[in-house]
Amino acid sequence: MIQKLGHEAWLAANPTAGGDTITMANALSAVASTLESLTTGMFRGRWDKATPAEKALLAAIAYAADDTGIARTADITCVLGRTAQQISSVRRSLIDKGLVAATGHGMVRLTMPGFGEFVLRHADIPASTSDSRPVLRQRGEPRQ
């Protein structure tokens, strides 16, 4: 990711036209072009190869993640309406593929910066309104 950002920033500086310094504008342009490249390339490829169960878990992780990108298993299972045991094999599959990392007991995060936003744009996130499951907090609301 860092190499991609650096490459895009250098291209934005236009070294063939005599540019030898990366400016803030070049860096911001690099971020935008890198995110676009990831969205159409790496993110899309990972998403398209995921099984429906993996997509559901990725979406639940992206939805339940806090501001640091960490999602608690309790929140993820609430979104999915399943137990931790029921999602464990899918969780393991995503870890094996390098898409998810365990960050502590009962916590996971997506491994690629920006992938959570991509997932949220491409998945339906069902927040429960039934009496059998609690309604998950809205993104940005503090955990209780």
Image: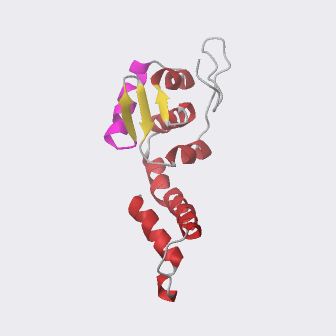
Q: Where residue 114 appears, x then y in whole percent?
A: 52, 49
- By secondary structure, the bulk of the magenta-drawn segment is best described as helix
Q: Residue furthest top?
A: 132
Going 53% across and 23% down the picture, which residue do you hit? 75
Q: Quadrant of residue 100?
A: top left
Please check the rendered image and state whether residue 28 is part of the magenta-colored stretch, yes or no. Answer: no
Q: Where residue 98 appears, x then y in whole percent?
A: 35, 44
Going 37% across and 25% down the picture, which residue do you hit? 88
Q: Residue furthest left?
A: 96
- Rendered position, 42 above or below 13: above
Q: Residue furthest right?
A: 129
- Rendered position, 101 above or below 82: below
Locate the N terminus and report the quarter of the image it occupies.
bottom left
Going 48% across and 69% down the picture, which residue do you hit? 8
Please check the rendered image and state whether residue 96 is part of the magenta-colored stretch, yes or no. Answer: yes
Q: How is the image coloured?
A: secondary structure
- Rendered position, 62 above or below 15: above
Q: Camera-side residue: 26 or 47? A: 26
Q: Is residue 91 left or right of residue 60?
A: left
- Rendered position, 19 above or below 100: below
Q: Where residue 19 appears, x then y in whole percent?
A: 50, 82
Give the total of numbered labels.
Answer: 0
Going 34% across and 32% down the picture, which residue do you hit? 92
Q: Where residue 67 appears, x then y in whole percent?
A: 55, 36
Q: Camera-side residue: 18 or 131? A: 18
Which span of residues is magenta-colored? 84-99
Locate the C terminus and report the quarter of the image it occupies.
top right
